Amino acid sequence: MSKPIVSGTSDTAVFTGVPCVDEPVEPVQPVEPNEPADDVEAPKLESVEVVSLTELKLKFDEEVILPVKEDVAAEAPVAEEPDPALELFSILNLDQNPIVILEVSYVETEALDTENNPVLDKTQLRLVTEPHMQDKEYFLKITGLTDGKGNVTIGDFKSSTNYKTPA
C-alpha cells in the first residue's frame, strides 16, 4: 500500500502549451556515395601544364564556367568588346612583369557529340599567351571564375600557383 506524499505546498500545477498535432514527416533521402554533397567551394586549380611557351593547360577539380561576350546588336558600333574570360587570369613573372593572355577556351576531347562537334572538357582550360621565357618561374592567379553552383575563385591558394617553363 502506497502512502501519499505530503509536501506542505500545493500538489497541483497548471500547465499551458500547444497541443501536439500529428503531421506526416518526410523521410530524409540518403546521399548516394557518388553524388557530391552541396557544393559550397570555388573550383580548385589542381595543375598547370606548360604545353609550349605560348600555351598552358589548367586542370580544375570540377567543371568551370567561362563568361561569354554579350551579344552586340547589329546597329552597335563595330568596336570589339574585350573577352571577359581574359580578365579572370593574371600571369606575372618573378619581376612582377605581366604576361598577356590572348585566349581562354575549354580543352577539346577526342570525342564528338551528336552533331560531330568536339566534346569540351569543362574541367580543363587552355590559355594562349604571349611568349614566356624559357626556364623561368611564373605566378598564375585566377579571380572570378565560377563553377556550376556559382562559387567564385578569389585568387587564394586554391586558385593560384607558381609554375616553371622548360629550359
Image (cartoon, helix red, strand yellow):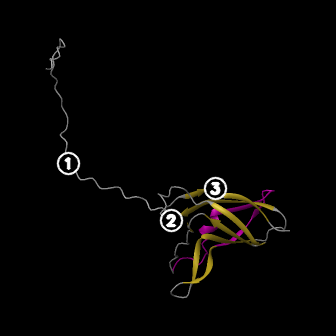
Q: Nearer the viewer, residue 145 or 75?
A: 145
Total marks drawn?
3
Q: Earlier in the sequence, mark 2 or mark 1?
A: 1
Left of 41 or right of it: where is 17?
left
Q: Earlier in the sequence, mark 3 or mark 2?
A: 2
Where is the C terminus found, in terms of image quarters?
bottom right
Q: Label 3 crowding class (10 Å Cα cut-off): few <14, some 14-19, many 20+?
A: some
**Is 10 placed above or below 68 here?**
above
Residue positioned 65% across, 62% down in the render: 46
On the image, numbered disc 2 is attached to which residue? 148
On the image, numbered disc 3 is attached to which residue? 158
Q: What residue type is labelled 2?
A: Gly
Q: Nearer the viewer, residue 53 or 121?
A: 121
In percent of width and height, residue 67 lies at 56, 68
**Separation of disc 3 and disc 2 at Cα?**
17 Å
Q: Which of marks 2 and 1 is in front?
A: 1
In percent of width and height, residue 3 lies at 15, 17
Left of 85 or right of it: where is 167?
right
